[in-house]
Amino acid sequence: MSLRNTSTHYGKLSIALHWLMALMIISLIAVGFYMESMPDGDDKWAIYGLHKATGVIVLVFALFRWYWTLSSEKLSSPEGYSKMDIGLAHAGKWFLMIMMLVMPLSGMGMSLFGGRSINMYGIFSIPGVAEANKPLAGILNTVHSVSAWIIAIMVGLHILFAFKHHLINKDITLTRMLGRN
């Protein structure tokens, strides 16, 4: 298996990006929902700090993933896919790709326009704006919260359809992303 995609196989880098980002995004969403239920205090703010820093890392990976996807060879659709299957798969993929930008950008904007910096694991900080814009931060908070639910639903559907293709259709959709075809 090569690093780059071919017309029939995902490359090692595409597979690694897919699974690394899946793990990070699912974890961030789970932690984000958990944080909402926590009482205010040092523990909550420490988790918020890690959540924000990891969200910035997801944004960096998402930007690279956009570049990699647009510059890589396009895979052919597995045999037996209807035009509707192909259309839904492409729509779902690109919707998730867009949400991988919207989610971290809205989270960063919410913090930065709220006047709060983002501490990147104690290595450096991304400073908040000097004059906070609370109305804009509030709008971005709403975008971030709604995006979390949208991504959670989309990821759930993505997983459901991957298993549907593997268990019912018995095609190569899932095994291709596992690097086994």
Image (tube, rainbow, N blue to C red):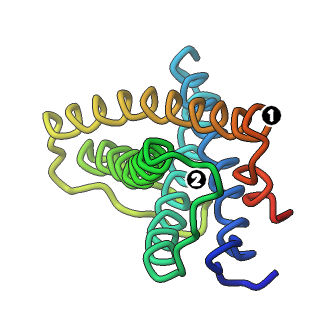
Q: Which residue is mark 1?
A: 167
Q: Are there few (<14), some (14-19), or many (20+) residues within 10 Å of tag 1?
A: few
Which numbered disc, 2 or 1, marks the residue that appears first in the sequence? Answer: 2
Which percent across, then down, holds residue 87?
41, 48
Q: State the SS at label 1.
A: helix
Residue 46 visible in the shown view = no
Tell me the amino acid under the disc marked 1. Leu
Front one among 155 and 138: 155
Q: Are marks 2 and 1 in contact (CB under 8 Å)?
A: no
- The C terminus, quarter of image: bottom right
Which percent across, then down, holds residue 106?
32, 45
Q: CA distance from mark 2 to mark 1?
A: 34 Å
- For the point 64% across and 29% down, the residue is 43
Instruction: Left or right? Give the position of 90 relative to 19.
Output: left
Which percent across, then down, holds residue 159?
66, 36
**Where residue 54 is drawn, which disc sits there?**
2
The quadrant holding residue 76 is bottom right
- For the point 66% across and 83% down, the residue is 4
- For the point 43% across and 76% down, the residue is 70
- For the point 61% across and 22% down, the residue is 34
In the image, residue 101 above or below residue 179: above
Front one among 173 and 118: 173
Residue 130 visible in the shown view = yes
The quadrant holding residue 26 is top right
Q: Are there few (<14), some (14-19), or many (20+) residues within 10 Å of tag 2?
A: some
- The N terminus, quarter of image: bottom right
Q: State the SS at label 2.
A: helix
Tell me the amino acid under the disc marked 2. Thr
